Image (cartoon, coloured by chain):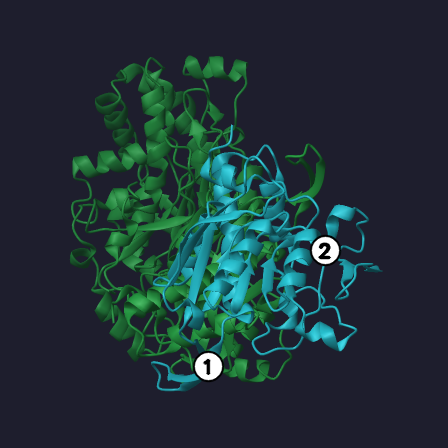
Amino acid sequence: MDFSNPFGLYTGEQQFPITSPTWPVTSAEDPLSGHVTSATGHVTSSRRSRYQSHPGAVREEPEEEVVAAGTGSSEGTRTRKLSQRQLSQVLERSGDIPVLFSAKPLSKETPDRKCEKKEGKRESIQVIYTAGRPPWYDSTGHQEADAFVIGLCGGSASGKTSVAKVIVEASGVPWVVILSQDCFYKEYNEKEKELIAKNEFNFDHPDAFDFALIYKTLKKLKSGKQVKVPVYDYVTHRRKKVWNTVYGANVVIFEGILAFADKRLTDLMDLKVFVDTDSDIRLARRLKRDISDRGRDLTSVLKQYNTFVKPSFDTYIAPTMSLADIVIPQGVENDVALQLIIRHVKRELDRRGYVTRSKTAPYNDRLTELPLPDGLDILPSTSEVKVLLTIIRDKTTSRDDFIFYSQRLMRLLLEHSLTFLPVTPEKVTTFRGEEYDGVAFTGKLCAVSIVRAGEVMETAIHSVVKDISIGKILIQTCQDTGEPALHYLRLPYGIANMHVILMDATVATGAAAMMAIRILLDHEVPEESISFVCLIASKPGVQAIAYAFPKVRIIVGEMDPDIDEYYHICPGLGNFGDRFFGTS
Amino acid sequence: MRRQQSTEQGPLLILYRISADSTDPRHLHVVMSVCMMAGTPPDNFFLPVAKCSGAAMDEFSRLHILKSNNQISWLQTILRNVKTSHGDFVFNADRLIRLVIEEALNFLPTHDKTVHTPKGVPYEGKAFNKGNCGVSLVRSGEAMEKSLRECCRSIRIGKMLIRHDDDDSSKPPKVIYVRLPPDIAERNVLLMYPLMNTGGTIHQSIRELKKNDVKEERIIICTLFVTPDSVRHICSDFPKVRILTTEVNEDCALHFGERYFGTDK
């Protein structure tokens, strides 16, 4: 996955073009650099082939590492478990699925998004999905609806992955995570490894999978939390140290040969789909893949098929067909069945959708009458702070001055926000050789900026904490709904144990800040470890944030009394990002 | 908080122990009378202000200590630690200096100003009056110029070089070099020097400023660390000068200039 220039894709801040679809990519902790690439990113399908941009592509990275590290290893033992990905590649090459899996832009293949949008309005459907992830929590900051979980089961080489991809792409729903059962093979002991080496281990048996971990992961993902998915090393048959981070799914597709084998899993699934492909076709695909792509001989492939794959299918996989809500014969070629599923998924998601901003706005009117929250801290209004605020609020201020004076105010604000960090006593030696009872901050600190206006504070935070790590969150307001939408996310590694300074320039309704805080909480950052810093906030916005997240400390330069009907701060300072970057 | 009264003649000094839980005499902080005057920063920015007992105190010098907090204590610890590396020393000294300079700007006179925001809504704010300047004392005072320049891009900065006699330290230090803005008599002066041990250098520089017709009440001394003795020394001779610092402590041996500029052994 290429994250090299995720922001280069966005040309404007105001509205993400509805016709250029983006796909969430479950992030990986980059195996080469060891850095977290954190939760999610986007790549447009026009820039790269569909496969690369697909969420499932996340598995490619670790696998590539296996290839790089696995020289001299047994190719045969590895190939068995790469089947899902390899399968789709085989299918692509063999031309089985001529249209849907070519690397053409999406608009050629699926109905135009704009048309969908119009249709949606005519049918008075509440939520129109754009590229970003719409809010998944309510005004109290709590999860409103669980993610929609689709279980996808079927025999080996039946085309599960292909079906998953079609569902993702055709339904046009962003923020989909495809979770593969292949990631959840158990760690094997020496005896089992010997069997594997001799091709005598049954990978199609339920005992081969760690169902407890699958259940835990799927349950957490369904409830909107960040999860770590193991990366299986097919050489050592152990899990790698660094696991993939997956976050932010509105739809979770769990696919695997034994996806329905555990009742706890099927209970989590909102829709269970069984891909029923004829066993002849499946065997033909296996043969083609293993022989022509992996260089294995016919006898060993057939032996494995007859000893393990076929009996396991008959014993464990085929009976679970009765659990499925929908059975698709012929897999991905069955267009009628796929359209049926896609329609159902869309309907379910629309049913779950809701609008927070218009909900919170009238709510805010009542909130403003409440006393100011305890977590609020306003920068002491010294004459200097007042002078700085006067300059940046003045509409006649030149951009040069605006940048300079807003950055000065940011530095004051961030210095102020650091004073809330806890310190521990520390004895140091002075030049006289005496002991001095000092203090030191020994905890970990990181900053997270909300793109774009929050990024302007990065200079200031670097000048007060020189080696701070900075995460980024891109949240944009969808102009159709007025809702914030999550587009991009990358957070520092180990953020759960850090004090987090969340930065944004201004707060009007507090919707973006609430989404950002919700994301941090989903990454298991304790609420009391979060300090939200902004230059100017409206009182309703502050109240909304404090109401949802009472333990979050809110540090503002100055608080304005109100927001107007356009959700702008009054008196405010205009659009901060436009004035700072000169894009108005 | 315990109160002690100094036995010195002249203006009464009221000394406070700021850290109620600390009995270490080095933590002795001195707060001298701060009378209500125009442009006094709000109380919450400073430590509790001692009420003066006599009318004469009103005219007495004013010492302002930056309100202490976790971060400032941490910065002070880093600067005092003999093991701090050169890079860390410069970075953290700059942070503390910046806080002092930002605070010093609060002492400068302002006037009310109403502006209109881009939404067309009037906003009642403030603006600084013109006519301020900085004066740094070579060499360690120059370390503070950077922060002043970062706050006020085009402020005029004068320089003075004042040296102690190497052979006889009992002699008053000599003024070697002076270059000041020509109209300094009309300006408020931020006098920058990070440490006041005996106060001799600062004392000499104020005399030099007064020679240039700068009024005492227009001088604000910006420092990081001061000793109680130096404060007494300056305040008794120049009662109207204001001193802004982060800590009053008997131990001010930080070798600031050496460490900041990296010329220590």
The picture places residue A283, in percent across and down from the top left corner, at: 29, 29
Question: What secondary structure is marked by label 2?
Answer: strand
Residue at the disc numbered 2:
B29
- Chain painted in green in the figure: A
Q: Residues within 10 Å of mark 1 (few under 14, many from 20)?
A: few
Q: Are marks 1 and 2 on the same chain?
A: yes
**Residue A81 position by quadrant:** top left
Please report the residue visible at 44 percent of the width from the left and 48 percent of the height from the top. Answer: A470
For the N terminus of chain A, the quadrant is top left
Q: Chain of mark 1?
A: B
- Residue A225 in view in this figure: no
Q: Label 2 is placed on what type of residue? A: His
Q: Is residue A71 above or below residue A336?
A: above
| Callout 1 touching callout 2 (CB < 8 Å) | no
In the picture provided, is A226 more to the left or to the right than A65? Answer: right
The picture places residue B176, in percent across and down from the top left corner, at: 44, 47
Q: Label 1 is placed on what type of residue? A: His
Task: Name the residue nearer the viewer: A45 or B88.
Answer: B88
Please report the residue visible at 47 percent of the width from the left and 65 percent of the height from the top. Answer: B189
- Residue A233 in view in this figure: yes
Residue at the disc numbered 1:
B111
Task: Name the residue nearer the viewer: B186 or B173.
Answer: B173
- Chain painted in cyan in the figure: B
Please report the residue visible at 40 percent of the width from the left and 27 percent of the height from the top. Answer: A309
Q: Chain of mark 2?
A: B
Please report the residue visible at 46 percent of the width from the left and 59 percent of the height from the top. Answer: A411
